[in-house]
Image (cartoon, rainbow, N blue to C red):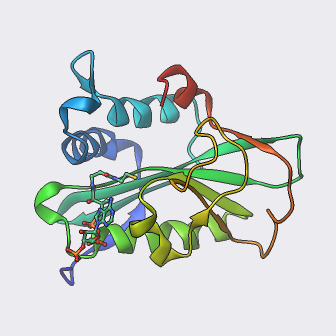
Amino acid sequence: MTKALIIRDAINEDIDSIYEVVSLAFQEEQNVRDGEIIQARLVKELIQDNDDVVNLVAEDSVIVGHVFVSPVTLEPDAGLSCGQVSPLSVLPEFQSEGIGSALMQAVIEKSKNEGLDALFLLGDPNYYKKFGFVASAVKSAYGPSEYFQELELKANCLESLNVHVHLAPAFIRLEL
Ligand SMILES: CC(C)(COP(=O)(O)OP(=O)(O)OC[C@H]1O[C@@H](n2cnc3c(N)ncnc32)[C@H](O)[C@@H]1OP(=O)(O)O)[C@@H](O)C(=O)NCCC(=O)NCCS
């Protein structure tokens, strides 16, 4: 990672760069829908819906990475405040330099500061276990899956909970 990397809250003026970074990071054919990268569309819609709990960019002269947390609801209500980390993106030419890890550490810290009790995400356990994520026993649209993971920011808050997690409406609309 270059020494110049800064991780900061996104501002309104960053939206085009964020869209570009997410589009390039997820630029596989399977992610194209109606000529658009679906994960980039997701970020746009989450912002339009005011479903941005944490929205961070990694900047090295230009924006090279981005991570987003949207709110989730637990049913029945367990009195917890939780978020879904998605998407996490680093420009292809800047990958494997530790930027994704720096974004993950920052998003965990920021989520704690925002008072979140737990984070969820869908992703490769081999990547996310190093940040403390473990397979979640909480029910979700993704079913029981080692890919649906959780991180308790407040110790044991998800333990023994029999709840279903619902993601923000943009995920449902886009069938993600
Ligand atoms: C996943 C991603 C954000 C990681 O960013 P990064 O800046 O490359 O991450 P880091 O430098 O901290 O870590 C890179 C290491 O993680 C590994 N890694 C990356 N994606 C991985 C995955 N899905 N599963 C396991 N390991 C993975 C890389 O092989 C690399 O290992 P190396 O250092 O031995 O080469 C980036 O690869 C990306 O934007 N990918 C495309 C979008 C995506 O898949 N996002 C995640 C969706 S869940």
The image quadrant that residue 140 belongs to is top right
Residue furthest toward the left? Answer: 93
Q: Say which quadrant the N terminus sits in.
A: bottom left
Could you tell me which residue is drawn at 53 percent across and 31 percent down? 171
Residue 62 in the image, given as x and y percentages of width and height: 18, 59
Q: Can residue 158 be seen at all in this image of the molecule? A: yes
Could you tell me which residue is drawn at 65 percent across and 45 percent down? 71
Does residue 58 appear to the left or right of 64 in the view shown? Answer: right
Residue 18 in the image, given as x and y percentages of width and height: 30, 45
Q: Nearer the viewer, residue 143 or 20?
A: 143
Looking at the rendered structure, the number of numbered marks drawn on it comes to 0
Q: Can residue 116 be seen at all in this image of the molecule? A: no
The image quadrant that residue 110 belongs to is bottom right
The image quadrant that residue 9 belongs to is bottom left
Residue furthest toward the bottom? Answer: 3
Could you tell me which residue is drawn at 23 percent across and 48 percent down? 25
Depicted 26 relative to depicted 62: above or below? above
Depicted 86 relative to depicted 175: above or below? below
Could you tell me which residue is drawn at 46 percent across and 77 percent down? 130
Residue 2 in the image, given as x and y percentages of width and height: 18, 80
Which quadrant of the render holds ligand 1?
bottom left
